[in-house]
Amino acid sequence: MRRIKETINETGEAGAPSDFAQNYVALGDVEADALFADFVAEPTLVLAVSGGPDSTALLYLAARWRNRRKSSPRLIAVTIDHGLRPQARHEAAAVKRLAGKLGVEHRTMRWRGAKPATGLQEKARLARYRLLHVAACRAKSRCVLTAHTLDDQAETVLFRMARGSGLAGIAGMARVVPFAALVSSAWRPGRPADAACSVGVPSEPVAGSAPVDEVLLVRPLLGLPKARLIVTLRAAGIAYAQDPSNVDPRFTRARLRKLMPALADEGLTPRRLTHLARRVRRSEAAVEAVVSWAARRLGLGPDTRKIALARQDWHEMPAEIALRLLGRAISAIGDEGPVELGKLESLTDALAGALAGEAPRFRRTLAGAMVSLQKDCIVMERAPARRHRIRA
């Protein structure tokens, strides 16, 4: 089975593109070939292209790579119009014109309906991923390529640190992640959304007209600074759009982006932050491996409805392993969806207190599972159905 490699290309760091672009050279054919080498056998690739510098570079580089090959995937550029700015239609039209010049098919998809008053960027992100997933299924493509860069990775690490994320969050964005993980905003023990996922691309093409079983999002430019992409576009004489929301101080990411030059002056450069993400990803993978081993010993599987864990075994586990194992058990046994990390931590703290003798009895429910103390065991089982009161 072919695997998409998750690597970080150590090409340097950049601050504001206009200030640093002169320090970089345009991407050559050899580097471009390496970026897309994993997709040689793919029948179709969907490219997410907004019209900004990063995604425009993705479109240009992918088309250049394809044109140098005798046999290559069909490329489909997809632009998502969120309906939030009047300029978006013009930007989508500009992408369509460029795609036509490069010999790439183009589709525009729109996020329709009322827009939320709060959490707009997060809701827009989820809508974008869902629409890209639809586009991939229609095209029978197993891979959607996006143009996230090294700078985006650094911003993601800072953003998640500011939100108090654990290891999975600080590990940053993975190069490859299933769409199923992206469209769930809740934390799922054992498979954190967009963290240290390493996914193989199926070696055989999708047969017939059936939709793909699992679409992957791939970020081939994740190891490249934005400045190199801008230099590449300038060298090719290709124009691009600038989204004003990228510098809008109402949004956290825009405020963090403004801080990046000052942080770089103190040594906290995008490259250093991506190094941190890579090292944390190693630690995250090690923790998950231990939790998987413990789950197998317990006999925890998708059809499990009840398990018991000896108190002594619980006490001997490191706190993080115990927390994640409990989360996996609740996710497998319960029937109310993913477990929220904050609620799981509260439950674990309460359980630790009960085990220390602070409460003679313990019984709590979370996400459709019930956790209780029985003799020398911690028992996890499906929670009884809730009783609905009938008012007279």
Image: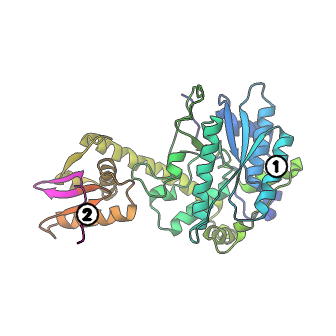
Which residue is located at x 28 percent, y 42 percent?
A: 300
Which of discs 1 and 2 lies nearer the camera? The answer is 2
How crowded is the residue under tag 1: few (<14 C-alpha within 10 Å), some, or many (20+)?
many
Q: In the rendered structure, does residue 254 fall within the stretch colored magenta? A: no
In front: 121, or 348?
Answer: 121
**Residue 327's spot in the image, x, y percent?**
33, 54
Hey, which quadrant is residue 205 in on the image?
top right
What amino acid type is highlighted by mark number 1? Thr
What amino acid type is highlighted by mark number 2? His
**Residue 108's spot in the image, x, y percent?**
73, 49
> Start and end of the magenta stretch?
371-392
Which residue is located at x 82 percent, y 49 percent?
A: 232
Position of 202 compared to 145: left or right?
left
Position of 21 compared to 181: left or right?
right
Quadrant occupied by the N terminus: top right
- Mark number for residue 388? 2
Alpha carbon separation for disc pair 1 and 2: 63 Å
Q: Is residue 218 visible?
A: no
Which residue is farthest left? Answer: 375
Quadrant occupied by the C terminus: bottom left
Q: Secondary structure at mark 2?
A: loop
Which residue is located at x 83 percent, y 52 percent?
A: 94
Which residue is located at x 56 percent, y 49 percent?
A: 174
Which residue is farthest right? Answer: 237
Q: Is residue 341 visible?
A: yes
In front: 159, or 361?
Answer: 361
**Residue 84's spot in the image, x, y percent?**
69, 65
- Mark number for residue 232? 1
